[in-house]
Amino acid sequence: MLRIAVCDDDKIFLNRVKLYIDDSAKKLNFDASVTTFTSALPFLSAHINKNFDIVFLDIKMPDMDGITAAKRMRQIPSKTKLIFLTSMERTVYESFSFAPYNFIRKSIAVNIADRIYDVMKHIAYESNISRYITVPLPYGKVRKVYLKDILYIKSKSHYIEYVLYGKNNVIVRENISAAELKLAEFNFVRIHKSYIVNMSNIRFVDVLNSTVELYNLAKIKYGKAYEDNFLNAYSEFSMQKPNM
């Protein structure tokens, strides 16, 4: 289930956004729990405890504005996707440093319901919300691993390790090339002879240092032989986001 927060001081707009999110989740066939807030401080307090998967955050609010709230939010390592709600065009560029996933403009010229659906649809696709693989365990057992939880896969001799976000890692006897073929259609890409990463869980790509930073803040060097393929794949993946 996706944990979603909406923070906006306009209660009427807040309830509309919640309704549109609930409707989008139903149409896209995934479960979502939506919590609403009318100010930033209660939201931040709840985020520390719940670590929301998606946050819709108004920029212009009394007491604490959305930019300040986003700055504090980003101090907590997480995979949270941040969508700003704003009627203030000039603040869009100021917010880029907080790695927003998208923007939804408060305007009579914008169909808010359609914009929310587009954003939610892409998040569902990008994150492989309901998709999983089964991996073999000793004694004939298997384990279900959701794709959205996989940060990266590391090769260790004749074994590979699935490094998961917030869960115990899984080590199985498998060839990394076989894992690469199995996961290629799900936004995973080989970046090194020993590493496959989930592009949905990339936080930042440092091209100058040939490094990928993931949502658990792990940093992995990508190999020269894999650089072009990785950068092309990630560029194509990034362009699939709905227009801001």
Image: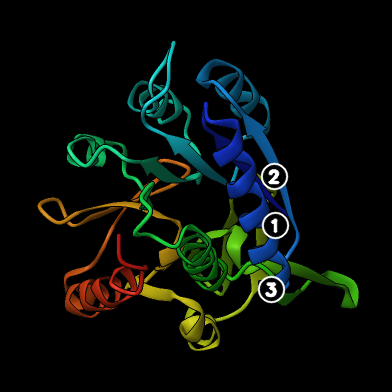
Amino acid type of the residue that numbered disc 2 sits on in the rendered structure: Val
Q: Mark 2 or mark 1, which is nearer the start of the sequence?
A: 1
Residue closest to the far left = 208
Picture coordinates of residue 170, whole percent (x, y): 68, 60
Q: Which corner quadrant holds the C terminus?
A: bottom left
Q: Work out whether 85 lies above or below 152.
A: above
Asked if disc 2 and disc 3 are in contact, CB closer than 8 Å, the reply is no
Q: Specify whether 19 is left or right of 244.
A: right
Q: Quadrant of residue 146?
A: bottom right
Of 117 and 172, which appears nearest the observer?
A: 117
Q: Mark 3 or mark 2, which is nearer the start of the sequence?
A: 3
Which residue shows up at 45% across the image and 75% down it? 187
Q: Work out whether 88 lies above or below 244.
A: above
Which residue shows up at 34% across the image and 59% down it? 109
Residue 84's tag is none
Of 147 and 57, which appears nearest the observer?
A: 57
Residue linked to disc 2: 34
Which secondary structure lies at badge 3? helix
**In 3D space, how far apart are the residues under numbered discs 2 and 3 (Cα atoms)?**
15 Å
Amino acid type of the residue that numbered disc 1 sits on in the rendered structure: Asp
Residue linked to disc 3: 27
**In 3D space, how far apart are the residues under numbered discs 1 and 3 (Cα atoms)?**
9 Å
Of 188 and 105, which appears nearest the observer?
A: 105
Picture coordinates of residue 171, whole percent (x, y): 66, 63
Amino acid type of the residue that numbered disc 3 sits on in the rendered structure: Lys
Residue linked to disc 1: 22
Which secondary structure lies at badge 1? helix
Asked if disc 1 and disc 3 are in contact, CB closer than 8 Å, the reply is no
Which secondary structure lies at badge 2? strand
Q: Which corner quadrant holds the N terminus?
A: bottom right
